[in-house]
Image (cartoon, rainbow, N blue to C red):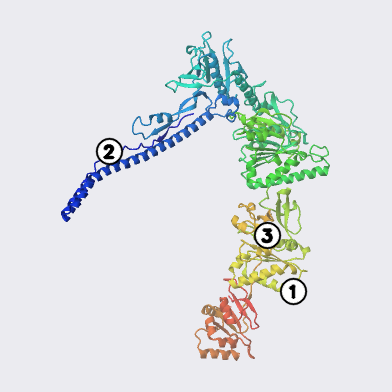
């Protein structure tokens, strides 16, 4: 373990006290004071103060010395305390460094006792070994000394760690010189550490010794013993004066040599250790160590080494790394594996086979077969990143496809890593679908259809009285369906509700012929016990820790697999111990050949197409022919409903008697108007229902008239349930926005009353709006059914009562959601025929007309031009002129055309209110005048008419006017053009 230089500061030493000076001023001051007092008073007693001068001087010197000593004692105590604290810090860091060093290079004693089992075959600097215990540089330096020799002992103590491992690197080679029993004991400790650090797949141990030496005989029991090619090979040598070894080791090999004399060591020993006694040894030569280093060597008895070798071999055997009867191949293609198989069933037949046995790799005794049915019926595959999980799944699927026909087994591939791994398998005729995380909508409907597939197979088996898919009584054979999921944890993260579905498949899949192969990096915690209990076939590639290995195959062996051998796999079943195999690799050329062979089978040549376990998504355009092939429903057909949970399309039909009022919410271009026209045509074409339909376009006049008419009919009892009516309002929210506030409130009251009281009178309403707003409070609550078409944003979709999961931004026109199901409306066969707006009657020319206009001059000019009759303008008319007009009106004297027409603005008519009142009263010679409001506001209408009732709203820009007839009725009219 390398040291890290660290500098700590020494506490500053207490400063020495300066010598005390003579207090001259304190001595002279009393003399001067005594002289001055004597001179002023003349009293000899004042000279007594002069005696105080030497007393004060001596007292001051003693006081200064006492204070300085006290301060020095305090500084010395603080310095000693700081030194003690520094020693504590150094001791703690040395202890921590020592513990980390022993953890990095555990001693052979701790290894054989099992105290360092967690570090087995996991060390990075594996060629570093500890020779024993001795001093080591700590990397701690103490700065701040004021003199070279200040705290020298403390600095030397801090810079060295005692009881630390004396570590050397075996890469340059290690030679041990000394009495053979002692040198062999140190060599055994070194070999134990090296074999503990490097697995048998990385290290080989080669023993070269003379015939009389038996020091290395125990090493033959190590799992690393052998001369097979490894990354590193350790040469064990014992050299004597009789049998010197003079050759230098080849490149890529480590050398551990033992000799009794220094000159007997072979070349290549970069590090040389001399053993002087059981507790005394010295490194006399090392690449990075100049002065010799004395230390206490670690000796290991041969019996302890043998016990370690036996235990390590058992651990290697459990991990599949021990030497067996045959060597395990490192690479093998699927084509080569299939060529070696002689007992594979023929790729024929159209019924489900009793088993799904196929080869997936090779073991020490030949090809390794797995049977998903007999050993399963479901399988779990675990393995960390880079261990070869995707390659295993690809090989397994390809091997099944090479062994069985599409009529015997089908595959549903689920890849939540983008789909690249399974893309080549999609060309197999056995493959009924490839689901990836790149298309969330397709993945959702396909996975939701799996429950329907189970129900379909149950119905098929029940109708035939069959027990399982292999029963000969099945008239329509069911191939086995293998669902292969790569990254099962990712799928559950996106669709957590699918875990219950997979638990159901695992519980019922055996008899229904549905099998699962679930692959994930860490099955522990992802595949729950309810699902794992039915997955008897377990395959584990290399995993990161023993807990994951235990969770998959019940042993620690998968955690010991070498990281540099992807595809190395352990297969565990309920009947035996885990079997080690090397999974074959599958090329795209292999898959192409398997697909070609499967297409040449009799069933495939006869046009057999495997049944997909789910339907395609709804088409963007639905026609009447599409409705004919779907499951029928009562009501007026309007489109198709998608039910992936039942693997079927259902006719979307609206039945007013069952569904009640219908609220349709959709943005511009979503298909609202087309839906209303389709519904109007369907109702009109269904003569047996005797239902009248009224399509109301987004027109302020038509919508008001319809609401007012039907509300009156319902209130008066004229409308009864015996003659049902269906009213369709298009873009009702846009109509509301164009009404004046008073009309808007009144119209909403009429609509609410119609929604509340209409069903009892046989009236149902369909309201189409662009967005769900508060224009009509409680509209969604008053409508028993809602259809959500495409909306601009998910916020609008949620506000309309939809779920975020059902929102799709790319919905085609006519696409929507009906009671949680995706719906696609019928496409219009032709351009919809918009019913023409009802035109009001032309302005009557009989009887006097009193016209209130916001532009009286313009209105008067227009009437003169069109009618060719004089028109009187009230503006500027004086009192006498108005009186004459009144007299002429009462006497029945009209203009040449026989009609009295007076035009004025609201203010003018208010000024001549007497004239207005008299002309509105019928006389014996003339009828009462009609009051016409041209481009007037509602306030003007109420001001002049003195009526609180609302007149019908007028469409802007169409020349509409209000006409208040003498009988009090208010109607619309059109000014003559």
Can residue 293 be seen? yes
Dot 2 corresponds to which residue?
A: 19
Q: Is residue 90 left or right of residue 691?
A: left
Dot 1 corresponds to which residue?
A: 717
Where residue 140 is drawn, which disc sits there? none
37 or 258, nearer to the observer? 37
553 or 181, nearer to the observer? 181
Q: Are marks 3 and 2 in contact (CB under 8 Å)?
A: no
Q: Position of residue 44 (x, y in %)?
A: 17, 52
User: Which residue is situated farthest in the top direction here?
Assistant: 242
Q: Position of residue 93 (x, y in %)?
A: 47, 34
Instruction: Count every numbered label the image shows and give the total.
Output: 3
Q: Is residue 506 left or right of residue 269?
A: right
What is the crowding at mark 2: few (fewer than 14 residues within 10 Å), some, or many (at least 20)?
few
Q: Is residue 818 left or right of residue 257?
A: right
787 is higher (above) or lower (below) than 101:
below
Residue 564, quarter of the rendered image: top right
Q: Of the residues tagged 2 and 1, which is closer to the observer?
A: 2
Q: Position of residue 422 (x, y in %)?
A: 64, 37
Can residue 595 be seen? no
Where residue 786 is drawn, which disc sits there? 3
748 is higher (above) or lower (below) than 528:
below
Label 3's element? strand
What is the crowding at mark 1: few (fewer than 14 residues within 10 Å), some, or many (at least 20)?
few
Q: Position of residue 446 (x, y in %)?
A: 68, 45
């Amino acid at each position: 373990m390398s040291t890290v230089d660290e500098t700590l500061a020494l506490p500053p030493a207490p400063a020495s006290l300066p010598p005390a000076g003579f207090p001259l001023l304190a001595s002279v001051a009393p003399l001067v004071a005594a002289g001055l007092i004597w001179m002023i008073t003349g009293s000899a007693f004042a000279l007594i103060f002069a005696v105080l001068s030497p007393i004060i001087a001596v007292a001051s010197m003693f006081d200064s010395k006492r204070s300085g000593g006290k301060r020095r004692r305090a500084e010395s105590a603080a310095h000693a305390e700081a030194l003690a604290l520094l020693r504590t810090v150094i001791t703690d860091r040395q202890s921590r460094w020592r513990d980390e060093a022993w953890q990095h290079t555990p001693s052979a004693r701790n290894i054989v006792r099992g105290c360092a089992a967690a570090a087995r075959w996991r060390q990075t600097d594996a060629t570093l070994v500890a020779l024993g215990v001795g001093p080591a540089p700590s990397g701690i330096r103490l700065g701040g000394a004021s003199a070279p020799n200040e705290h020298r002992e403390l600095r030397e103590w801090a810079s060295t760690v005692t009881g630390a491992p004396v570590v050397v690197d075996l890469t340059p080679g290690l030679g041990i010189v000394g009495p053979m029993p002692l040198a062999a004991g140190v060599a055994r400790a070194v070999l134990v550490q090296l074999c503990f650090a490097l697995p048998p797949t990385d290290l080989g141990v080669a023993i070269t010794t003379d015939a009389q030496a038996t020091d290395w005989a125990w090493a033959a029991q190590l799992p690393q013993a052998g001369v097979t090619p490894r990354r590193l090979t350790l040469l064990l040598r014992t050299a004597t004066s009789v049998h010197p070894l003079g050759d230098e080791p080849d490149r890529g090999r480590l050398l551990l040599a033992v000799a009794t004399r220094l000159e007997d060591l072979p070349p290549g020993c970069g590090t040389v250790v001399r053993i002087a006694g059981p507790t005394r040894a010295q490194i006399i030569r090392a690449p990075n160590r100049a002065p010799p280093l004395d230390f206490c060597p670690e000796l290991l008895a041969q019996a302890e080494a043998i016990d370690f070798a036996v235990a390590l071999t058992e651990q290697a055997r459990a991990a599949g790394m021990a030497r067996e009867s045959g060597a395990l191949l490192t690479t093998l293609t699927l084509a080569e594996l299939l060529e070696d198989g002689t007992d594979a069933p023929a790729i024929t037949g159209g019924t489900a086979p009793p088993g799904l046995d196929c080869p997936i790799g090779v073991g020490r005794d030949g090809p390794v077969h797995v049977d998903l049915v007999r050993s399963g019926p479901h399988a779990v595959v675990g393995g960390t990143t880079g261990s070869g999980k995707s390659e295993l799944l690809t090989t397994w699927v390809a091997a099944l496809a090479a062994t069985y026909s599409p009529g015997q087994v089908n595959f549903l591939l689920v890849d939540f890593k983008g789909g690249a791994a399974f893309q080549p398998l999609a060309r197999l005729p056995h493959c009924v679908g490839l689901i990836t995380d790149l298309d969330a909508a397709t993945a959702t409907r396909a996975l939701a259809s799996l429950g329907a597939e189970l129900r379909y197979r149950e119905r098929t088996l029940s109708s035939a009285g069959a027990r399982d898919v292999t029963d000969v009584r099945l008239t329509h054979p069911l191939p086995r369906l293998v669902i292969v999921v790569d990254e099962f944890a990712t799928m559950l993260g996106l669709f957590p509700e699918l875990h219950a579905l997979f638990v159901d498949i695992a519980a019922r899949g055996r008899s229904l012929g549905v099998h699962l192969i679930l692959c994930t990096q860490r099955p522990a915690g992802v595949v729950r016990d309810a699902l794992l209990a039915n997955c008897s076939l377990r395959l584990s590639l290399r995993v990161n820790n023993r807990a994951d290995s235990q969770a998959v195959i019940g042993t620690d062996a998968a955690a010991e697999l070498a990281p540099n051998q992807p595809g190395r796999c352990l297969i565990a079943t309920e009947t035996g111990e885990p079997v080690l195999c090397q999974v074959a690799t599958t090329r795209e050329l292999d898959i192409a050949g398997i697909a070609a062979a499967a297409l040449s089978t009799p069933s495939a040549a006869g046009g057999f197409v495997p049944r997909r376990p789910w339907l395609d998504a709804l088409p963007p355009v639905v026609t009447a022919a599409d409705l004919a092939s779907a499951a029928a429903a009562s009501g007026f057909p309007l489109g198709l409903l998608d039910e992936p949970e039942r693997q079927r399309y259902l006719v979307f039909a609206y039945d007013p008697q069952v569904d009640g009022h219908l609220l349709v919410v959709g943005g511009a271009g979503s298909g609202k108007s087309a839906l209303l026209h389709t519904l109007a045509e369907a109702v009109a074409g269904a003569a047996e229902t005797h239902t009248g339909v009224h399509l109301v376009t987004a027109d302020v006049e038509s919508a008001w008239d319809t609401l007012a008419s039907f509300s009156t009919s319902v209130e008066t009892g004229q409308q009864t349930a015996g003659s049902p009516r269906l009213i369709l309002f298009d873009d009702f929210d846009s109509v509301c926005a164009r009404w004046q506030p008073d009309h808007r409130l009144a119209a909403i009251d009429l609509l609410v009353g119609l929604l509340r009281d209409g069903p009892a009178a046989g009236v149902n309403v369909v309201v189409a709006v662009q967005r769900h707003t508060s224009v009509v409070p409680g509209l969604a609550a008053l409508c028993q059914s809602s259809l959500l078409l495409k909306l601009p944003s998910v916020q609008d979709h949620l506000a309309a009562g939809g779920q975020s999961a059902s929102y799709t931004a790319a919905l085609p026109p006519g696409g929507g959601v009906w009671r949680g199901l995706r719906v696609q409306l019928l496409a219009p066969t032709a351009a919809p025929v918009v019913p023409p707006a009802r035109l009001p009657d032309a302005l009557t020319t009989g009887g006097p007309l009193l016209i209130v206009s916001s532009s009286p001059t313009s209105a008067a000019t227009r009437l003169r031009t069109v009618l060719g009759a004089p028109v009187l303008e009230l503006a500027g008319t004086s009192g006498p002129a108005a009186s004459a007009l009144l007299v002429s009106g009462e006497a029945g004297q009209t203009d040449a055309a026989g009609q009295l027409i007076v035009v004025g603005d609201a203010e003018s008519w208010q000024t001549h209110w007497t004239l207005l009142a008299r002309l509105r009263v019928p006389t014996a010679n003339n009828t009462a005048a009609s009051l016409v409001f041209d481009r007037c506001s509602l306030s003007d209408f109420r001001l002049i008419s003195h009526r609180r009732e609302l007149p019908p709203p007028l469409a802007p820009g169409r020349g509409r006017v209000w006409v208040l007839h003498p009988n009090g009725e208010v109607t619309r009219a059109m000014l003559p053009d």
